[in-house]
Image: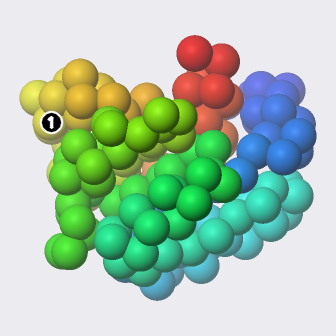
């Protein structure tokens, strides 16, 4: 990704996009918190899926970035829970396993994107920007 595209995604996010990270991997959570703070996004971190769901239900979340393999509320289950909301946030799932079938199923169930770990921050920012345009 070129610097111009990265800057565009970062600029788009500076306009108050509220991000919720749902990650039980402390390395991933800390890394993403720092990245989003650097671009000036309001960001919160939940280390359990059920805690993330409660934060989403507060209505103060635009984009959810969740690990697919959370033990208490896996990403696909989180999508099902969010489907009944009046204003469902955009959801981007992350996974350790590449599976076209799983990614397609997640998108069919409402995910904006599925990213395989490890991913670059530019990939995530671009996925967020695309999801907000749709």
Judging depth in this view, the residue of 59 and 37 nearest the camera is 59
Q: Is residue 4 above or below residue 38?
A: above
Extreme-bottom residue of the structure: 26
Count every numbered label the image shows and give the total: 1
Quadrant containing the N terminus is: top right
Judging depth in this view, the residue of 85 and 52 nearest the camera is 85
Q: Is residue 10 visible?
A: no
Q: Residue at x 64, y 27 (%)?
A: 132
Q: Which residue is mark 1?
A: 102
Extreme-left residue of the structure: 101
Instruction: State left or right for residue 43 relative to residue 37.
Output: left
The colour scheme is rainbow
Q: Position of residue 104 (x, y in %)?
A: 20, 25
Instruction: State left or right for residue 124 relative to residue 13.
Output: left
Q: Position of residue 87 (x, y in %)?
A: 53, 34
Q: Residue at x 82, y 33 (%)?
A: 12
Q: Is residue 5 above or below residue 48?
A: above
Q: Residue at x 36, y 51 (%)?
A: 94
Q: Position of residue 68 (x, y in %)?
A: 27, 56
Instruction: State left or right for residue 97 relative to residue 15.
Output: left
Tag 1 secondary structure: helix
Q: Residue at x 57, y 60 (%)?
A: 58
Q: Is residue 24 visible?
A: yes
Quadrant containing the C terminus is: top right
């Amino acid at each position: 990704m070129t610097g111009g595209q990265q800057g565009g995604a970062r600029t788009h996010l500076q306009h108050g996009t509220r991000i919720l990270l749902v990650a039980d991997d402390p390395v991933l959570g800390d890394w993403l918190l720092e990245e989003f703070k650097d671009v000036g996004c309001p960001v919160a971190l939940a280390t359990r899926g059920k805690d993330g769901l409660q934060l989403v239900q507060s209505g103060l979340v635009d984009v959810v970035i969740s690990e697919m393999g959370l033990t208490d509320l896996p990403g696909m289950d989180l999508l099902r829970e969010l489907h009944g909301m009046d204003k469902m946030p955009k959801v981007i799932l992350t996974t350790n396993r590449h599976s076209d079938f799983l990614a397609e199923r997640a998108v069919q169930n409402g995910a904006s994107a599925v990213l395989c770990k490890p991913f670059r921050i530019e990939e995530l920012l671009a996925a967020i920007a695309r999801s907000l345009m749709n």
